[in-house]
Amino acid sequence: MERNAAINRTTKETDIAIRLNLDGTGQSEISTGIGFFDHMLEGFAKHGFFDLNCQVKGDLNVDGHHTVEDAGIVLGNAIKEALGDKKGIRRYGYFILPMDDALALCAVDLCGRPYFSFEGEINAPTVGDFDTELVREFFYAVSYSAAMNLHIKILSGHNAHHMIEAAFKSFAKALDMAVGIDPRVTDVLSTKGSL
């Protein structure tokens, strides 16, 4: 069973094409126009073992908000499509990831009900050309488009680069666990019979 998705989305603000393979090897080809954001998505693909091609053309003459938020929307849609009926998946995933001074926790439930919680203060307004306020916007967009319950907590840290990277990588590891196939799950992991 191949768990792939290809999503294109074009608005007056962004033109985005994402291809995702949930059962990949961590290969990526990323171009968003924001170097630090590219780096975060490359880390997400590598550490989640997802193959990800993400091409974004956004109105960076305005700022990075539409580029980052819309990329989150399309990535969430790709995750949802690639999961299909969710039969056999573990559904839940969690990870606590250290990165030097930073420590981030992520928990995921692929329940079909969107909810997002983010805790953590990033103590710098930008990293490179990336507005750190957009971390929350990106993950909110992913969670609601994928219809997942997503909790991210940056537990500690003082370097903004490390804190954000720990959040992206902990999300990758938690999502990899949640989308993983468990042979004991013969249908979907829910007493309701659907996710």
Image (tube, helix red, strand yellow):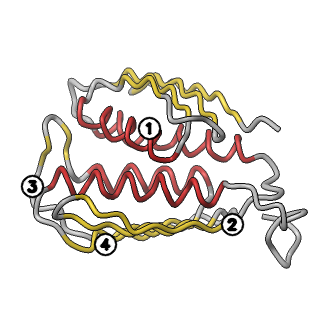
Question: On residue 181, which mark appears?
Answer: none
Q: Which amino acid does label 2 sit on?
A: Cys
- Which residue is tagged 4? 119
What's the residue at 11%, 64% (across, down)?
A: 158
Q: Which amino acid does label 3 sit on?
A: Ala
Q: Where is residue 140 in the image (x, y as percent from the top left)?
A: 44, 57
Q: Which amino acid does label 1 sit on?
A: Asp
In the rendered image, the vertical position of residue 87 relative to residue 13, given as above or below = below
Which is nearer the N-term, disc 2 or disc 4?
2
Disc 4 is placed on an element classified as strand
Question: On residue 111, which mark appears?
Answer: 2
Q: Where is residue 97 in the image (x, y as percent from the top left)?
A: 35, 63
Q: Where is residue 68 in the image (x, y as percent from the top left)?
A: 35, 39
**In 3D space, how far apart are the residues under numbered discs 4 and 1 (Cα atoms)?**
22 Å
Q: Label 1 crowding class (10 Å Cα cut-off): few <14, some 14-19, many 20+?
A: many
Q: Label 3 crowding class (10 Å Cα cut-off): few <14, some 14-19, many 20+?
A: few
Disc 2 is placed on an element classified as loop
Q: Residue 160, located in which quarter of the rendered image?
A: bottom left
Q: Label 2 crowding class (10 Å Cα cut-off): few <14, some 14-19, many 20+?
A: some
Q: Which amino acid does label 4 sit on?
A: Glu
- Tell whether label 3 touches label 1 (CB within 8 Å): no
- Which residue is tagged 3? 124
Point out the frontmost of discs 1 and 3. 3
- Tell whether label 4 touches label 3 (CB within 8 Å): no
Question: On residue 70, which mark appears?
Answer: 1
**In 3D space, how far apart are the residues under numbered discs 3 and 2 (Cα atoms)?**
34 Å
Which quadrant holds the N terminus?
top right
